[in-house]
Image (spheres, rainbow, N blue to C red):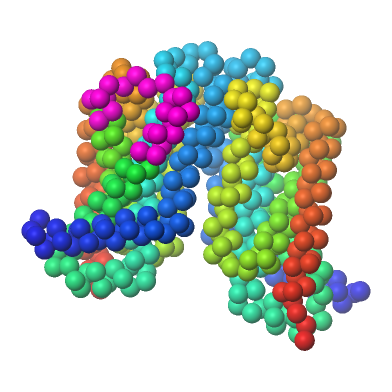
Amino acid sequence: MTGQLERTYEVARRSFVRAWRQPATVIPSITFPLMLLAVNAAGLNSATKIPGFPTDSYISFALAVPFLQGAIFALLNSGTDLARDAETGFLQRLALSPLSGSALLAGTLGGVLAIAILQTVTYLGVGLAAGAEFEAGLAGIPILFALALTIQFAFGCIGTYFALRVPSAEAMQSMFPVFFIFLFFSSGSLPRDLIAQDWFRTIATINPVSYLIEGIRSLFITGIDGEALGLAFGISIALGAIFLSAAAVALRSRLVRT
Amino acid sequence: MNARSRSVAGAVAWRSVHNFLTNPALFFPAVIFPLFFFAAFAGGLSNIGNVPGFDYPNGYTAFQFGFVLLQAAAFGGVFTGFGIAADFESGFGRRMMLAAPNRLAIIAGYSAAALVRAGIISALLFGIALLVGMDLSAGAADLVAMIVLALLVNLAAGLWGAGIALRFRSLQAGPLMQTPVFLVLFLAPVYVPLDLLTSWIHTVASINPITPIIEAVRSLIAGEPEYVGIAFLIGIVLTLLFGLWAVRGMHKAEAAGG
């Protein structure tokens, strides 16, 4: 067991260090969401004048979105790294070692979580410095970290699954727009009840990303909202469980031991 | 431009357009992205049209169409820059330079291809906007002016991308082509008219050279032309400046041996 833990730790350390040594990978995943936040929060500030808008601070409303954008970057980066490992034959070499499949998955996702902590601290710090409110108070901070990490874990599992199914770093990178579509067609810019177009509101309502955003957002604009947080935790745990199981199955064929 | 140079430009343009139309990986993202932005902005944010002070006469769909048209034109130019970078990275650019007595014809060919791409995407965007009920009050002259403005933006962005592509001759320079264009576009009045912007974004948008072009296109859609002269002047100046930038880039590529 100690051996497995050590091997998991080494894979996690490799995953984190590899990401950290590629500033072109880590820096955009932190700065790009903040840049979009700055532009959108300033440009859409007048949306707070729409009757029924839940807060008078658009930046507080919009600050949840970078957490999801960061999660999408985590998904793509972890998936790309794992796909590259498959492409270069590194996974096949691992198959010769005593490393178990679960340790490989845990280690890869551990690296994702380490980057996620960095992202969460940055988004929260920059958001609060830019004038966002955090209605949940001190008690909400551990909840925010727990939710952000759960979401990142779930997205990391999605990235891991796709990387194992389609082991191509280029294919992983080209999936960026696909995942961004989920973000755009969500309640990221306006609350669902204020989306005027029925078709858009319907898509935003069935889009699970809306509930992840609303869970994080509730901590900024409402306080500790059990329903919003329950849905966000429930959906992210369900996504994580589904894609982790799928990734474990895909890994069996990818990590063939002979 | 003599007959030989026209032949080179025509061949480069034909190849680029042919690749664009026959490669789904190039064609679909270029077509789907503007439509996706149009749907996300005009659909998801249409309630912004109810913000007090929002006085655009043709509604939020038409308001957003003006922006998305220019965005599609600009990114059509940037994507052509990607094509140039890919050609030079693979060594095809070097072979083209050997075959072209006047290498500026290569830039002319790529620029012509960018214009054709922008024309195709704009026509599709226009058709879909009218299908979903965009209120268009523009007369024939307004439409022509609007299309020429969009093509000027496409040309300027394409020449910007060409300048970067010819200096770096690698697709790794993609973010350098894309990010400044993205930033300049989104630091304009994207979601609401300039008068409704507040704080730093109002100051930045007021001095952003793209702002008069966006406002001119929106005014042309509404059939009430404003800022058209200054918009054309800015479009022509940007095209000339980035043309010079691209020409100098070609000289650097020549000096480096392609």
Q: Quadrant of residue B123?
A: top left
A11 in the magenta segment? no
Quadrant location of the N terminus of chain A? bottom right
Residue drawn at (10%, 56%), measured in percent from left and top? B1
Residue closest to the eye, B28 or A139: B28
A226 vs B48, left or right, is right
**Where's residue B229, x and y in %?**
22, 26
Q: Of all residues shown, which one is farthest toward the bottom? A: A258
Quadrant location of the C terminus of chain A? bottom right
How many circles with numbers are drawn on the protein?
A: 0
Say above or below: B29 vs A193: below
Residue drawn at (25%, 61%), measured in percent from left and top? B12
B133 vs A102, left or right, is left
Which residues fall within the magenta stretch? B123-144
B129 in the magenta segment? yes
Residue drawn at (71%, 53%), measured in percent from left and top? A155
